[in-house]
Image (tube, rainbow, N blue to C red):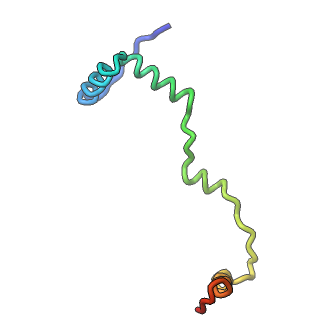
Amino acid sequence: MKIRLNITIEEAVLEKIKQYTSKKKVSLSQLIEDYLESIVKHPSKRKSIIEMADELHAPALDADKDLKQSYYEEQKSKYGFTR
């Protein structure tokens, strides 16, 4: 069953979308319905940066180890750099 829906949009947007629907030979109602259906069927799979950070595993670190010194020692052994 179809139900009437009233929406409010900017006039300039309406003119552009009317041109678009005319070129595509589809009604504005159908375009909106298809778009809304796609949102419901396929919700965004993108995650926020906060969600991604929460999923990261913390590395196992030795609390007594000087990380800066360890970095320079590793670089020295790899490339012969001295600090």
Above or below for 67 versus 20? below
- Residue 28, located in which quarter of the rendered image? top left
Q: Residue furthest top?
A: 1
Q: Does residue 82 lie above or below 51 as drawn?
A: below
At a point 50% along the width and 7% down the height, the residue shown is 1
Residue 14 lies left or right of residue 44; in this view the side is left
Q: Which residue in the rendered view is the most extreme toward the bottom?
A: 82
Up-down relation of residue 57 to residue 82 (above or below): above
Q: Residue furthest front?
A: 79
Give the x, y percent position of residue 75.
63, 83
* Picture residue at 24% right of the left edge, 25% below the top: 15
Expressed as whole percent of the image width and height from the top left, the position of residue 67 reads 67, 80
Which quarter of the image is occupied by the C terminus?
bottom right
Query: Which residue sits at x=46%, y=22%?
Result: 34
Kindly indicate the quadrant of the structure image that contains residue 54.
bottom right
Is 7 or 20 nearer to us in this picture? 20
The quadrant holding residue 26 is: top left
Q: Is residue 2 left or right of residue 50?
A: left
Q: Residue at x 70, y 64 (%)?
A: 58
Q: Is residue 55 above or below residue 10?
A: below
Q: Say left or right for 82 vs 26.
A: right
In the rendered picture of this protein, how many numbered marks are placed on residues? 0
Residue 72 image position (x, y, % from top left): 63, 85
Q: Position of residue 42 (x, y in %)?
A: 56, 31
Q: Nearer the viewer, residue 44 or 72?
A: 72
